[in-house]
Amino acid sequence: MSKSDTALRTISELAEELGVAQHILRYWETRFPQLRPLTRAGNRRYYRPADVALAHRIHQLLNRDGFTVKGAQQALASKDVGDVEAPVKVAPSAPVVIAPVPTSAPAPALDLSALRAVRDRLCRALEGDLPNSPARLL
C-alpha cells in the first residue's frame, strides 16, 4: 500500500523510493541546506512533501544529469534547473551503453627498423660511444 503524496515519509521510505542508501540522504542534508526534514524524538527524520520533491530533484541532478555536488548546490541555489517544489517522477533508468569512438583512419603501422635504430643510438650514447653522450660527460 502506497502513502498519499501529502503524507510524511521516513528516511527508509524515501531511501527506498529513490533507490539510494539512507546514509546518502543524511549526507545530502549536510550539503544542501534546503533539505531539512522534521526530526522527532531519537532523531527520527520525517520528510515533508516539499522535502521529498527536493530529494527527487537532488537525485536527478546528481545521478541522472551528471552534476557534481557543488554544481547541484549552485543549480538549486539559482533555480536555473527548474521548480524544486514540483514533484519529480522518477522512472527506472536504462542501462548505459558505451559505444567505441569511431576513428577517421586506422593507426599507422610501426616501422620497427626505425625504432631499433633509435634504440641502438641511445644505447651507444649511454655507453659513451657518441660525442656529447652523457657517459662521456661524467
Image: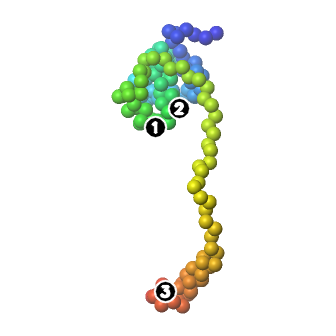
The amino acid at mark 2 is Arg
Q: Which mark is residue 68?
A: 1
* Residue 38 image offset from top left, x and y in percent: 45, 16
Q: Nearer the viewer, residue 110 or 63?
A: 110
Place of residue 134 in the rendered image (x, y in percent of width and height, measured from the top left): 48, 84
Quickly name the residue at label 2.
Answer: 64
Residue at image location 62% in from the left, 74% down from the top: 111
Residue type, numbered disc 1 = Thr
Percent position (x, y) of residue 35?
A: 43, 23
Per the model, the C-alpha gap separating discs 2 and 3 is 57 Å
**Residue ID at (41%, 36%):** 70
Amino acid type at image mark 3: Ser
Question: In this view of the protein, can residue 12 be seen by the observer?
Answer: no
- The mark that comes first in sequence, 3 or 1, is 1
Q: What percent of the width, then of the height, locates residue 41?
A: 48, 15
For label 1, the SS is loop
Q: Is residue 16 visible in the rendered structure shown here?
A: yes
Label 3 secondary element: loop
Describe the element under mark 2 as helix, strand or loop.
helix
Report which residue position mark 3 lands on: 133
Q: Is residue 120 above or below residue 33?
A: below
Q: Which mark's residue is nearer the viewer, 2 or 3?
A: 2
Which of 112/49 is in front? 112
* Relative vertical location of residue 97 with respect to residue 121 in this rendering, above or below: above
Is there CB contact under 8 Å for labels 1 and 2?
Answer: no
For residue 79, the mark is none
Quarter of image, res 15: top right
The N terminus, quarter of image: top right
Residue count near mark 2 (Cα–Cα under 10 Å), binned few <14, some 14–19, many ≥20: few
Q: Are marks 2 and 3 in contact (CB under 8 Å)?
A: no
Q: Foreground residue, 67 or 103?
A: 103
N-terminal-most mark, 2 or 3? 2
